[in-house]
């Protein structure tokens, strides 16, 4: 029996920086490294051409952003439909949310979260209106949606005009393995510290973390602890929380206790992970929560906010803040710092939890979903 043809649009890798980039890269790795018995996957454009191109990568000027958007929508409107005909595709797979308006075969979009509807202030209003109109039109005919968590599916059902049967959950691959056997790096911070890694946007709730840490270090025995915040300011000024974080650090006179690293090398990042006491992820709005799994891979106990996706991903391996307040988070920091046995138990549970998000399971689940869609 001839294999079914899956056309995979990876053009977004030209600019991807966050979770969607990880998702597409892991997908490409699986396609390249493991042949499928049922499907022939065709990546467009080629991964090699994207790696060679630097035109849209990094911090770009306004006119480049406009040019990218123009090419992106032209690709969705014209190029992908034409490619689907050329390759006689059975499925056109868009892991970057937006499917073409029309295509040969069925259209499958990966919509990772409901940020467009829940946090519209994160986007330019005109762009958002156009994008959502395009998204709704692309889902109007012969389209299916894959999302990355049950929580995301529940949220998307509130906003999309798509039947429940046409939204499937496929947990993504973390692309991670246990890193406790990795070569040890020297510590960059000599004192015990809590760690957070990520862009400093308001939705990450890092001001609450600074508030909580200020109370934590006032306690006896914890005066020498540090908080390490790895990451750059948010890319959009109205969403960036960096100035507020700095202001709070100064207000609480924590300049010697809170480390703002900015961008760091991979070696430095590994060092920060390897020597942290614990990882703190107080974000109130996440589509999946890959940093939780990243922390598991380094053998770190993890504290999370009581947020649907983070709870779903972390399972019994995380310490959930009882209430999303500075006082509640301070209590969790204190518990983790005091209880060495708890930390050891959480590390072991984290390793086990990480195993449930393997690349092999992701690829098998995705193919199972494609079979289901094609048999409908």
Image (cartoon, rainbow, N blue to C red):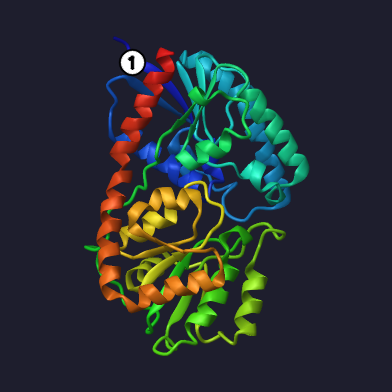
Across the whole image, how many numbered discs are drawn on residues? 1
Residue 261 showing in the rendered view: no
**Nearer to the camera, 10 or 94:** 94
Few, some or many residues within 10 Å of mark 1 (<14, 14–19, 20+) = few
In the rendered image, the residue lying farthest to the front is 322
Residue ranking furthest to the top: 1
Q: As drawn, is 345 to the left or to the right of 265?
A: left
**Relative to 104, residue 174 above or below:** below
Image coords of residue 69 (percent x, y): 67, 39
Q: Nearer the viewer, residue 95 or 211?
A: 211
Residue with the most extreme right position: 126
| Quadrant of the rendering where the N terminus is positioned | top left
Q: Residue 28: image x %, image y %?
A: 39, 37
Q: Residue furthest left?
A: 181
Above or below: residue 221 compared with residue 77: below
State the residue at coordinates (30%, 51%).
Answer: 353
**Residue 211: image x %, image y %?**
57, 76
Q: Secondary structure at mark 1?
A: loop
Residue at point 65%, 40% (across, down):
68
Q: Which residue is mark 1?
A: 3
Q: Is residue 172 left or right of residue 66?
A: left
Q: Quadrant of residue 80?
A: top right
Image coordinates for residue 138, horizontal then vertical, percent? 62, 24
Check the picture and name the quadrant holding the C terminus.
Answer: top left
Residue depicted at 59% across the width and 41% down the height: 114
Determine if residue 369 is in view: yes
Residue at 31% across / 77% down in the picture? 186
């Amino acid at each position: 029996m001839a294999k079914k043809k899956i056309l995979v649009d990876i053009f977004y890798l030209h600019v991807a920086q966050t979770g969607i980039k990880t998702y597409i890269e892991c997908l490409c790795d699986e396609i390249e490294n493991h042949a499928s018995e049922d499907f022939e996957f065709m990546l467009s454009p080629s991964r090699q051409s994207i790696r060679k191109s630097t035109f849209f990568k990094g911090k770009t000027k306004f006119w480049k952003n406009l040019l990218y958007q123009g090419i992106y929508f032209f690709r969705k409107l014209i190029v992908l439909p034409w490619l689907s005909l050329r390759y006689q595709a059975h499925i056109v797979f868009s892991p970057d949310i937006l499917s073409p308006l029309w295509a040969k075969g069925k259209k499958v979009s990966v919509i990772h979260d409901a940020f467009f509807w829940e946090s519209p202030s994160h986007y330019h209003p005109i762009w958002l209106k156009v994008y959502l109109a395009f998204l709704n039109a692309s889902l109007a005919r012969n389209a299916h949606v894959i999302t990355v968590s049950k929580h995301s599916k529940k949220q998307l059902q509130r906003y999309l005009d798509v039947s429940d049967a046409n939204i499937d959950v496929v947990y993504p691959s973390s692309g991670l393995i246990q890193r406790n056997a990795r070569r040890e790096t020297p510590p960059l911070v000599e004192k015990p510290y809590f760690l957070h890694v990520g862009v400093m946007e308001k939705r990450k709730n890092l001001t609450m973390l600074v508030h909580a840490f200020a109370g934590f270090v006032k306690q006896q025995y914890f005066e020498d602890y540090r908080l390490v915040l790895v990451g750059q300011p948010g890319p959009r000024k109205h969403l960036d929380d960096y100035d507020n974080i700095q202001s709070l650090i100064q207000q609480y006179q924590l300049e010697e206790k809170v480390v703002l690293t900015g961008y760091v090398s991979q070696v430095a990042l590994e060092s920060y992970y390897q020597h942290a006491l614990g990882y703190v992820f107080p974000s109130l709005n996440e589509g999946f929560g890959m940093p939780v799994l990243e922390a598991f891979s380094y053998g770190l106990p993890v504290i999370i906010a009581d947020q649907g996706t983070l709870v779903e991903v972390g399972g019994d391996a995380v310490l959930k803040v009882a209430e999303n307040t500075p006082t509640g988070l301070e209590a969790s920091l204190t518990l983790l710092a005091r209880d060495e046995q708890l930390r050891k138990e959480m590390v072991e549970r984290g390793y086990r939890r990480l195993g449930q998000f393997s690349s092999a399971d992701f690829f098998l689940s995705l193919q199972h979903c494609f079979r289901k869609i094609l048999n409908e």
